[in-house]
Amino acid sequence: MKSPTRSGSLNVTTVPTVWLLLLSALLGACERLPGDVLVTPTPIPTPVPLPKAVHPVTRGDIVDSVTLLGLVDSRRRENLSFRIAGRLNRFHVRPGDGVEAGQLLAELDVGFLPHELAKAEKQLEIAQLRLEAAEGTKSLAVADAQATLSLDKLGLDQARAGAQEEEIARRELAIANETARLELLAEQHDREIALLQAEVELKAIDVEMLLARIEQAQLLAPFAGVVRYTDGEVGQMIEEYAPVMGLADPDALEVRSSLPSDEELPKLRPGQAVAIVFRLYPKRDVTGRLIQVSTPTSAGSADEGLPVRIEFSAPDLELEIGSLADMRIVVERKEDVLTIPNVTIHSYFNRRYVLVKEGESTVEVDITLGVDDGERSEVLAGLEENEQVYER
């Protein structure tokens, strides 16, 4: 027997569809409430590219130069060191101090050497006194012997005058004996004096050696100048001939600078003119000359940290070591050549090109460049005068 079918019953497959329709209606009703105002969104404007500046190709003069920042320094500089190793006792001066030639600058600890020196000097003094006493004794003894000899000769003369043969013989014998005694006496005293003289010389050598050791432990100024630096601390062991101080002559000035970039370094040659403006005198132009460019491999000690040297003459300027100077070294000068601003030059690896305006279009043109002064470059090929080029 079949089950009766209910009239008006829904197919189960239509239930999800009904629920979806109801949900959509509810959501649509929630989007806008009574009183809401519809707002139309503002459209984002399309960006308009800014027009690039155009520059003409012009003729003019151009100077290739290298700019450097320099320090005033001295042409006469010396690194000072002790000739012996030892422990640093003290510095007598500081960087920036002015010193006179022969002035004591620093010293090592010499221990008891001053006492040994005083003792040796006293021993030398005693030896000299002994020598002087021996020389005085000789003079007295020789004088006494010579007086006796003179009396004997006088007696001989009297004996001869009286024709006293026996007295003559006795006087002659006495004279011979006295002469021999005088020679022997002088010889003995000479030997004693020679020994004392040798003792004095030995004592003098002892004093000289102690003085030399003390002198080697002292650092004296070889010339009048200004102390540039000191290196070391009190109590530190110092190696022999290790620089501990720098001295410079403030009356023999030059300008020193560090090396330029690797691209600019090959441009520098000794003899090139240098325009110098000292920071202390910004309105005064001074002309100098490049005299030395030391590469890092040829630069010597750490003190040679500024290997570019420029000489100048400005005796009326009161400059001090360490004053700053702005320098411009002229490398090459060209007149009446085609030039363009550097802001128009494009680079892609080894390629150099510009964007040239031709009517309403733009054309890439490869160019060959020459001298560059930092703002404009010489055009050797690729462009003609009055052509228009765009900035990058």
Image: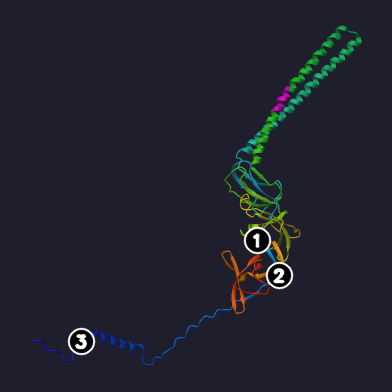
Residue indicated by mark 3: 11
Query: What is the quadrant of the N terminus in the image?
Result: bottom left
Residue indicated by mark 1: 69
* Magenta-drawn segment: 191-198
Q: Main secondary structure of the magenta part?
A: helix
Whether residue 182 appears in magenta in the rendering, the answer is no
Q: Could you say which is closer to the camera, residue 221 or residue 196?
A: 221
- The alpha-carbon separation of the residues under discs 1 and 2 comes to 28 Å
Amino acid marked by disc 1 = Leu
Residue indicated by mark 2: 60
Amino acid marked by disc 3 = Asn
- Cβ–Cβ below 8 Å for labels 1 and 3? no
Q: Secondary structure at mark 2?
A: strand
**For the residues carrying marks 1 and 2, which lies nearer the camera in this image?**
2
The quadrant in which residue 35 appears is bottom left
168 lies above or below 264: above
